[in-house]
Amino acid sequence: MALSTKEITLLELAKGAQQASLKLSSVSTGQKNQALECMADLLVENEKTLIDANAKDLVYGEEKGLSQAMLERLTLTPERIASTADGLREVASFDDPVGEVSETSTRPSGIEVSRMRIPLGVILMIYESRPNVTADAASLCLKSGNAIILRGGSEAFNSNQAIVKLWHQALEEVGLPAQSVQLVPTTDREAVSELLKMDEWIDLVIPRGGEGLIRSVAEQSRIPVIKHYKGVCNLYIDESADLNMAIDLTVNSKVSRPSVCNSLENLLVHQSVAEQVLPLLIEKLKSHTVEVRGCERTRQIVPDVIEATEADWYEEYVDYILAIRVVDDLNMAIDHINRYGSLHTETIVTNDESKSNEFLRRVNSSCVMVNASTRFNDGGQLGLGAEIGISTTKLHAFGPMGLRELTTQKFIVKGNGETRT
């Protein structure tokens, strides 16, 4: 069957990315860092161009009826552009994992066996809103020796085009192939379906967005997929908690940026401190326009709270909404997390070291915290620099994915004429 022009274009896109990845796998750290530094400078120098392109997307987003949370994700500001540039410079400052040799041993046969870190190859990134991801994801792929194909949402198409144009300028200025960073040149959804069949040319798919998008990608793809269906993050206030700290952590986890995946969705409170902490906490949450939904025991303490349903415990609101449940003890809190959580981020607020250790040991989400806001589950905050996403599947990466998570290891063997009997 003859291929259409669109299919040929996508195939050429994928083939070009693979050729670029072969070159990137052996490029020096210095040359990759030059490209990152150049791109960081270009982002700052072209702030007005980027904001003008983003303004078109915001108009389109409003016409499309995007929620305020989605529009907030979509917005580029001078501060966000500067922060993105700083993230690229931070990635440039990190050690390059490519070529790192470890786990060396000499076998009884005399051969020396080691492992060497290598890039994954070509990564297809499918994401919604957040045009800063176009810069962040590409920076991590470039530093780890991978080529990337970017497929952003239609709502961010102008912003993404402007950013990728700067990427091409930066790459060409330092002598690297422009195909190292490519944007799918159409918002047609059929393009994604075609790319997901190209397992000969693309090595990994990372979808980043709503649960519907990620499930659709996972169902269609012939290529391995890093999955992160949703971020149902939980915070548990233990009976020994510093209650002022608990209030501050809850409010920060929920309101500092409710549209992101590490925002708090479920609050669990030990029954012995519920009457003391909930009235103060709920009052403070409402002062930040947070809609509170609560279990029966919560509503007995604060009657004007909306009744929580079973569905609320599973919900990723990405909005100013929080569900609260009073629990009997640590075991009940952990049972709730295991049943309703999404393996993303969980926090315990406690002054009991044995309780914190038990929580850390028994809760198997990608990031488990003690006395800290859920908002810290972020590649930059955890020392990875800009992250390409957060994986809630345990193969091959779990949690925020930085440079090392964008590489794998091959065995290398050195001998001196040894033969096998």
Image (spheres, helix red, strand yellow):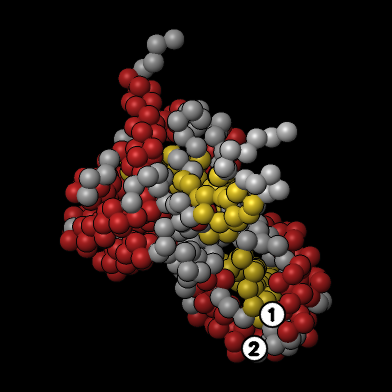
For the N terminus, the quadrant is: top left
Q: Which mark is residue 300?
A: none
In the rendered view of the protein, which quadrant contains the C terminus? top right
Can residue 137 be seen?
Answer: no
- Read off the residue under disc 2: 243
Mark 2: amino acid: Leu
Neighbour tally class for label 2: few under 14, some 14-19, many 20 plus, Cα within 10 Å: many
Q: Residue at x 50, y 50 (%)?
A: 117
Left/right of residue 46 with respect to residue 293 in the rendered view: left
Look at 64% across and 69% down and name the residue there.
368
Q: Earlier in the sequence, mark 2 or mark 1?
A: 1
Q: Is residue 355 left or right of residue 202?
A: right
Q: Quadrant of residue 294?
A: bottom right
Give how far across and how far down residue 68 sits, in percent.
Answer: 41, 60
Q: Residues within 10 Å of mark 1 (few under 14, many from 20)?
A: many
CA distance for labels 2 and 1: 8 Å
- Could you tell me which residue is drawn at 56 percent across and 31 percent down? 222
Residue 400 picture location, percent across and down: 53, 59
**On screen, residue 133 above or below 377:** above
Contact check, label 2 and label 1, Cβ < 8 Å: yes
- Mark 2 lies on a secondary structure that is helix
Residue 347: image x %, image y %? 64, 73
Q: Is residue 237 left or right of residue 210?
A: right
Check the image and name the residue furthest to the top: 1
Query: In which quadrant of the rendered view does residue 328 lie?
Result: bottom right
Which disc is residue 237 wearing? 1
Q: Is residue 214 left or right of residue 4?
A: right
Looking at the rendered structure, the kind of residue marked 1 is: Ile
Who is closer to the viewer here, 405 or 338? 405
| Residue occupying the point 71% across, 72% down | 360
Q: Is residue 311 visible?
A: yes
